[in-house]
Amino acid sequence: MRIAVVGTGGVGGYYGARLAQKKHEVSFIARGAHLQAIQRNGLQIKSVLSDLLIKPARATDKPTEVGPVDLVLFCTKAYDTASAALEAKALVGPTTTVVSLQNGLDAHEHIGKVVGMEHMIAGVTGLISTPEAPGIIKMASDSPWVALGELDGRLTPRVQAVGDAFREAGVETYVSESIMVELWTKLMIVSPLAGFGSLTRLPIGDYRSVPETRILIAGLKREIADLAAANHVTLQADVVERTLAGIDGLPLLWKSSMQLDVESGHRSELEAIIGVICRKGRERGVPTPVAEMLYAALLPADLKARRIA
């Protein structure tokens, strides 16, 4: 399979390398020092599972040099989606499948508006993986997973083929007939961690068990569940309690990628992770006071970072 990875960061770099290891023809779209290091030294994965070096690695900052492929993995930061989608048009031919593994609910819609919704399937992933240095990705999850699905729930040959490719690469992979449930559930996991971690600027062990803070964490999860229902997506009845238990299982010093961006003064995925709850709440008439509080508190720093970027 010919594959292009748009956004060779923690997610795209790791999965792209695993697919390349299985002899798929993978082209990595990257920029700057990261691109130069990959071109010079290959793409190195440091993993708790097994290290990997893809050398030589096909890497470029010009999708036109790659041309149409069978599969595009879209893994950029959410705020780069619009510009990256315009560049990615060169990768999309009549039979190309495009899957987003980004944070948020609606990245597939934004990409689809540019490349054509008929090419899109939706995806969700769970892993802890970040760029450690130019050309080097550090993956710290012992059981990374991917869920994929057609937006209409059909089990089509193309979504099965993408699922098979990930499984053959050693990734725990599910093909879902209800991918929107997966997307909303992931948002329920990510948003409280990103929001309260960024607000407190503390490791999770310092805030998750504080009773007053935990009430707000659970409240945000219930807002997301109510909003999902208003959007005709039915989550599991115990999803709030189950995802709270998941928070309790994270390492004491864990921080989300959004929190790390906020702490370093970089632009964050605030709009995709918190802002989307506020916007969809207003659209549906669903109150989201905890999300609104987090968004209002974090927005000034994010606006400053956008001006500097």
Image (spheres, grey):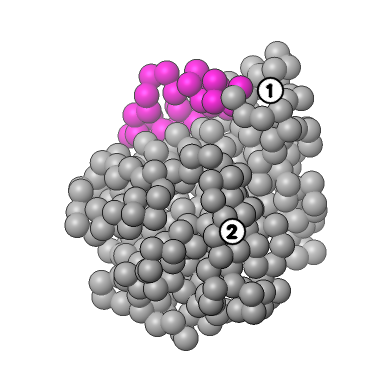
Q: Residue furthest top?
A: 211
Of callouts 2 and 1, which one flags the residue occurring earlier in the amino acid sequence?
2
Magenta stretch contains residue 229: yes
In the picture, the disc for residue 208 is 1
In the rendered image, residue 275, in percent from the top left (x then y), is placed at: 59, 44
Closer to the camera, 179 or 219?
A: 179
Q: What residue is drawn where x is 35% and y is 73%?
A: 2
Specify the quadrant of the image occupied by residue 194: top right
Image coords of residue 159 (percent x, y): 27, 55
Rendered view: 2 above or below 195: below
Residue at screen point 34% across, 29% down: 234
Disc 1 marks a residue whose amino acid type is Arg
Question: Which residue range is magenta in the image?
Answer: 220-248
Q: Quadrant of residue 162?
A: bottom left
The front one of 250 and 56 is 56
**Residue 232: percent from the left, percent from the top?**
33, 34
What quarter of the picture does the C terminus occupy? bottom right
**Can residue 77 be spotted in the picture?**
no
Dot 2 lies on which element? strand
**One can see residue 93 in this view:** yes
Amino acid tagged 2: Ile
The circle drawn on residue 45 is 2
* Residue 157 located within the stretch drawn in magenta: no
Q: Does 211 sit left or right of 248 as displayed?
A: right
Determine the main secondary structure of the stretch shown in magenta. helix
Q: Is residue 26 rendered to the left or right of residue 158? A: right
Indicate left or right for 128 with 208 as reference. left
Q: Within 10 Å of the Cα at label 1, are there few (<14), some (14-19), or many (20+) other Cα atoms?
A: many
CA distance for labels 2 and 1: 31 Å
